[in-house]
Amino acid sequence: MAVEAIYNHMKKRGIKKIAIMTGTTGFGKSGRGELTRLAPEYGITIVADETYGPKDTSVTAQLTKIKGLAPQAIVNWSIGPTQVIALRNWQELGMTNITFYQSHGFGSKKNIDLAVGAAEGVFTPLGACNYAEILPDDHPQKGVTMEYRRAYSTKYFEPVSSFGGHAWDALQLVVQALKAVGCDHAKIRDHIEGIKGFVGQHGVFSFSPEEHNGLTKEAFQMIVVKNGAWAFAD
C-alpha cells in the first residue's frame, strides 16, 4: 500500500524514470520487492537499483551512480539512521533537483530534525497519527489521534511517531478481544477477525478470516516535509 501511494503520486506528477535505494534488512528487501513488482503497472522504469547495509555510514557511492543516470525521482526504503544519511548525502551531492521519496518508515519527526534541513520537500506516505493536528475536524480519526497525541506528549515530552501508533493499534485490538472473550488464543483470533470499523491511529480497520491487514489504501496519505513539519502533499 505504501508503494502504491508513492507510485500514484508519481503518476500524478508525470514521473516515469526512477532510481530505488533499499536497505538489506527485511524491511528494505520487502520494499524492494514491491517497488520492482509494481513499477510496470504504473508505467515506471527503474533505471538504478542500489542497496546498502543497515550500519553503513555513507551512501554517496550509490547516489553518485544514480546521479549519472538522471532519474526523475529517487525512492529510499529503509529504517533507522541510514534513511537520514541518504538524505544528507543527497543534499551534499547537489541532487535536490531529483525528487526524493522515503518509505513510511520515515514516520518520525526526529528524522526531520536529524536531517538538519535535508528533509525539506521530501515525500513520504504516512498514517494519520503523524499529522493529527492538520486533519479536518470531520475526519473519522481526528478524535482518536488527537487524544493519543495529547496523552503521549504529556507522558514522554516528545512528538508521536508511526511506530508508537502501530503499537497502540495492535494493543487496543488485543485488549478489546481479551475483554470480550478472555485468554483463549483461538477465541481472540476469531474475535479480531470479526472486528469492523475499528478507528485506530493508522486507519479504520475492518478484518475477516481472509483479511488480516484490515486497512484500505486510504489509510496512507502522501505527506511532504514543509518548514520542518508534516504537510499534505499536492
Image (cartoon, grey):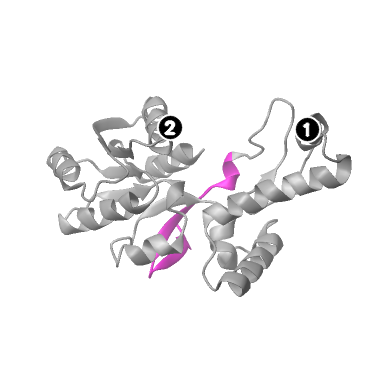
The amino acid sitting under disc 1 is His
Where does residue 55 sit, x and y in percent of width and height? 29, 46
The correct choice, above or below, for 220 with respect to 156 in the image is above
Residue at image location 38% in from the left, 32% down from the top: 29
Specify whether residue 152 is painted magenta.
no
The amino acid sitting under disc 2 is Ser
Marks 1 and 2 sit apart, C-alpha to C-alpha, by: 29 Å
Q: Which image quarter: residue 54?
A: top left
Which labelled disc corresponds to residue 221?
Answer: none
Q: Is residue 28 left or right of residue 162?
A: left
For this orientation, the residue located farthest to the front is 183
Which contiguous range is marked in magenta? 217-234
Q: Is residue 203 left or right of residue 65?
A: right
Residue at image location 67% in from the left, 57% down from the top: 141
Residue at image location 34% in from the left, 53% down from the top: 81
Where does residue 40 sit, x and y in percent of width and height? 37, 25
Where does residue 45 sit, x and y in percent of width and height? 29, 30
Q: Residues within 10 Å of mark 2 (few under 14, many from 20)?
A: some
What residue did someone put label 1 on? 185
What residue did someone put label 2 on? 30
The correct choice, above or below, for 149 with respect to 124 in the image is below
